[in-house]
Amino acid sequence: MSYYPIFLGLGSNIGDREQFLKEAVQSLNTSDNFQVSNISCLYETEPKYLREQARFYNLVLEGVSELTADDLLDFNKHIEAQSGRDFQQKRNGPRKIDIDILFFSDQVISSALLTIPHPKIEERRFVLQPITDIAPDYIHPVKNRTMQELLNNCSDTDQVEKIKDIKSWISH
């Protein structure tokens, strides 16, 4: 396993949001492809971009992997598909599970399929709030600011409400 941090953002706003997220975390953590080392609290957040949909549950994971960023993206899509995600849905629309690669070490990647760091992190309180739970001092490799600094300066005013601590989801 690599020992550089990889951060994943997970969200759900259809059905039993908490259960879908818990199953996705367990799928990631029990695979040989990704080992979860830390997890944020669970948050309820307003939908972004398409406002006429249910509120999301969001969290951020930190972990390690031997996969390349492209292979991790494929693995995440596999977990989303197993969870019943409909990839034909409208972009930013309702979904059972969404798994985004936020950071892959300090790598900067821009391809047709993948952009890392994930675009617009600094504009998304629903990402910044949970990531500061577990890595407030992690430095964005492009913005050269810590997660806490980005959160402190975030212009996003959407409500992000802490639901509960979910460390037990990854305890061994």
Image (cartoon, rainbow, N blue to C red):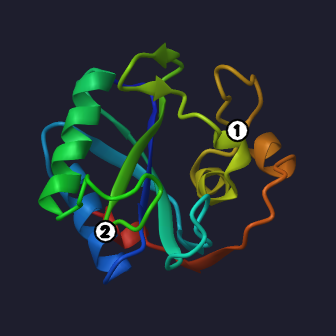
User: Which of these two is toward me, 112 or 88?
Assistant: 88
Q: Residues within 10 Å of mark 1 (few under 14, many from 20)?
A: few
Q: Which residue was labeled with disc 2? A: 96
Identified by mark 1, the residue type is Asp
Q: Residues within 10 Å of mark 2 (few under 14, many from 20)?
A: many
For marks 2 and 1, the one nearer the N-term is 2
User: Which of these two is toward me, 128 or 166?
Assistant: 128
Instruction: Establish if 14 lies above or below 114.
Output: below
Question: What residue is at 53 percent from the left and 77 percent from the top?
Answer: 55
Q: Secondary structure at mark 2?
A: loop
Q: Quadrant of the C terminus?
A: bottom left
Identified by mark 2, the residue type is Lys
Q: Which mark is residue 84?
A: none
Q: Which residue was labeled with disc 1? A: 137
Residue 24: percent from left, percent from top: 26, 60
Q: Is residue 158 left or right of residue 47?
A: right
